[in-house]
Structure formats: structure tokens, C-alpha cells
Amino acid sequence: MTIKVRLAPSPTGNLHIGTARTAVFNWLFARHHHGKFVLRIEDTDVERSRPEFTENILQGLRWLGLNWDEGPFFQTQRLEIYKQAVQTLLDRGLAYRCYTTSEELDALREAQKARGEAPRYDNRHRNLTPEQEAAYKAEGRSFVIRFKIDDDREIVWNDLVRDKMVWRGSDLGGDMVIARAAADGIGQPLYNFAVVVDDIDMQITHVIRGEDHIANTAKQILLYEAFGAKIPEFAHTPLILNQEGRKLSKRDGVTSISDFKQMGFTAEALVNYMTLLGWSPPDSTQEIFTLQEAAQQFSFERVNKAGAKFDWAKLDWINSQYIHTMSVDKLIDLVIPYWEEAGYKLTGGREERSWLERLVTLIQPSLTRLVDAVAISKLFFTDTVEFSEEAATQLKQEGVATAIKGVIVALQNQQELNEASAQDIIKKVVKEQNFKKGLIMRSLRAALTGDMHGPDLIQSWLLLHQIGLDKLRLAKAIAEDN
Ligand code: GLU
């Protein structure tokens, strides 16, 4: 049997971390079993679905490296199939037209509430006579299609994550609506129905999705039976929780995968972290791995039942591991968009690959998120720097101006500045002016970078020199008006 799984996002928002994590588990399971991963866009909710959300979902999955084998299929292109499926259930006497009005449903709910009962449809139109139907039609009532649910039914499945699950038909709220009416007859299918028709049609063997769908699964199993189809395996994965143990939401500053990208997480680190949200590899000390490595080891036996707490510190740590170990070439390409976003221009020598290599090598160990490159390298993308209070104080110390002048003079006689010649200049000034080396280093840092802390001084100096900014900054630092 070929394993076939699917991701079935609704394009009513950007690709959310929860959906992306579901995608990860589907992908890992499919790859582990050399199966197929299908992508299906559930866009039947025409009011809330938008093409830009579909685009965001596709882009996000591609960015994360979660490639699919079939699709994307769009439910709106399959409406004819659902209509036929509804007709099949009507023909088999397993579904019926229900003409109950929303006012009647409201009244029913109120009465149930007053009696302290859970709201449910009372199946009142299950056995209408043709005459009753005709009378409702004549009244101009519209209808929905309901699927019969037997209250006494016990629904049991062996969940791959949660083990034995037992539901009663009476827990499912009465006969369920599977489609609404349209002018030309059977119209919009509802989620629980379309999903089963599609999963049967697409020969899905394993349905892997968030545990918020458990009650849907009970209903869906009854639909599989009604169609005489093989019931797939189900795996309900734990929810992602915030630090307080509640379902992660926008309020936690976490929304979509594109937001994570903008915040400076790399795709590899994010997908690595998501893999650990609810799953752990057999060697649970292993925290850094590729999707392919995780796929080799993936099984639902190691997926937790309990919710997975989202941990920013851990995500940051994993991200920094990826950034610190990646090639400088790759890192250059990854940080450029963040610089561009910040308005930094790759001009005036900054477009030189050798300059970029030197800069990125310098900042690489200090980056946790790619976006950190913006603040850390600001001093290389502006002509002048603002002096911090500490730096200004440093520059006012006695003798500092003379020392810096000494550096400027030495620089004038210098053909090419490299690490050795920069060190020579410092030595020369130390010797000629009888200054402590530390004082000169601190003063140079203040003058060149405007700050007392930052990346390696000599390297920073060489970078500034390459784009012709070092002399300018030194002169500015000792000018009267700074
Ligand atoms: N469209 C549903 C959702 O986005 C799919 C759930 C499922 O996987 O069946 O929640």
C-alpha cells in the first residue's frame, strides 16, 4: 500500500505556525514511508477565502522545504463532485432535505438551554412525507442537506497519537448539515462532507491534523461508512501552546510563517524547531537535524499527546546554530534582503563580494536572527556615526586627539591597509607618542564606530577603509564641532 497524506489548509489567512507544523508531520510521515504528500486548498468558504492567502500558504510551504507531490487541488473546482456525492447519499436514504428555518432552530436551542441541555438538532425533518416537503417548498423555505446520525452509534478508532478514541452518535449534535441549498438545487458543501469526499477520491491513507479536529473525525467516520469507503488511519497532533499553557495565538506575537521569516528566522531552523513541537527523535538529546534526517526517524510513537509549549529561547538558539555554521556565501544572500528592507544601499564599494564576505564573517558569530545584521552593521552603511555618550567621553580624554591625528598621518603614508599594516600604525603611534595601546584602541573604536562595544576593531577598520570611510570618521571625531 502506498502511504498518502494530505495538508488541507483553508486560505482564510496566511500560513499559520499550527498549519505549518501539521504540514511538517505530514511531510515527515510521507517521506519516511516513501509515500505521497498531497496539497489541497479548502476554499469553499468563498466569503473568507482569498487568493493572496493561497499564495502565502504555497510560498510558506516552499520556503520551509515542504514540497508536495500532488496538487494544489482546489475544492472550488470540485463542486460538481460534491453535488454528485450528496445525491448518492440522498439516493441511499442516508441524507435528507431539512427545511427548518433559522428562527425555528433558534427557538429549539433556547428551549434546550432552558432545560439545561446541550444544543442539538432534533432531527425533526428526518422523515418528512412528500406532501410535507411540497408544503414547505410552497412556503418558499430553503433547505439544507442533513446526514443521518444514529444517536446509539458508537464510533471507535485507534488514533495513532491518542490511542483508542470512543465517541457516541448522541454527542454529535443530531443529524449534520453536509450542504446548503443553492438556486439550482444542492449548493455549497460543508467542510466535514467535502473533506471526506476528497480524502476518499484522493485515496488518502492517513489523515494527520491538529487535535482540534477530533470531534470532526467522529462525524467523518460515519460518512466514510455511508459511502462504503475504507476508513483511513487518523493521527491527531497536539496543539501548540504558549508559556501559560493556552493555545498559541496572535496575542503571543506569533502569527504566520511569513512573520517568522521577517523576524529573521531561517527556514531550516524554523522547520527544525517545528519538528520538535510535539515530536522527539529516538535520541532525544539530538536537537539539530535536517528534515531528511528527521524523516528517517519519524514515527507517531514519539509524538506526544500533551500540548507542545512554544519556546522562543529555544527557537532563537536553534536559529543561531544554523546561522553560525552556514557558509558565509549563503549568509550574505540571506542578510541582503534585511539590509535592503532597512534602506541600506550596496553601493560605494559595498557591492564588492570581498567586502561583503569580510563584513559577514565579522558579524556572523553575533547574529541570533538574520535581522540582527541590520543593527550590527549599521555603522558600515552610514557615512557618519552618532557618538554614544561613552564614545564622546572617550574622545575628549587628554591626548586622544593627538593620537588620532597620528593615526591619520600614518594612514596617509599607507598604500594598502591590511591587518598587519593596521597593527603597525597602532604600534607606531604608541611608540611615537608614548601612549598606552589600550587607550589608542579604545579611542579608535570610539572614532570609527561611534561606540565602545562592537565587532572586532581591526576588522571593522579595514571594512571602513575599503569603502573610504575611516579617514572621514577619524577627522570628524577630532573636529571641534563633533
Ligand atoms: N481545512 C481544514 C483546516 O484548515 C482542514 C482540516 C483537515 O485536515 O481535515 O482546518
Image: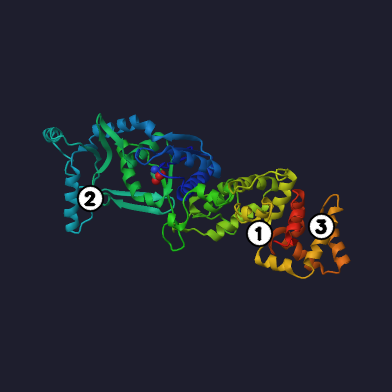
Residue 427: where, in percent of width, then height?
A: 86, 63
Q: Residue at x 55, y 51 (%)?
A: 270
Of the image marks 1 and 3, the number of the one nearer the N terminus: 1
For label 1, the SS is loop
Distance (Cα) linking label 1 and label 3: 20 Å
Task: Tell me the CA gap for discs 1 and 2.
Answer: 68 Å
Residue 239 visible in rendering: no
Label 3 amino acid? Ile
Amino acid type for the residue under numbered disc 2: Arg
Q: Quadrant of residue 392?
A: bottom right
Q: Which residue is mark 2?
A: 120
Give me the disc on residue 386.
1
Circle 1 residues within 10 Å: few <14, some 14–19, many ≥20: some
Q: Amino acid at mark 1?
A: Glu
Name the mark nearer the viewer: 1 or 2: 1
Quadrant for the C terminus in the image? bottom right
Circles 2 and 3: CB atoms closer than 8 Å: no
Is residue 300 visible to the viewer in this orientation of the structure? yes
Local packing at callout 2 (Cα closer than 10 Å; few below 14, some 14-19, many 20+) is: some
Split into quadrants, the picture shows ligand 1 in the one at top left
Percent across and percent down for residue 50 are 41, 39
Q: Which residue is mark 3?
A: 408
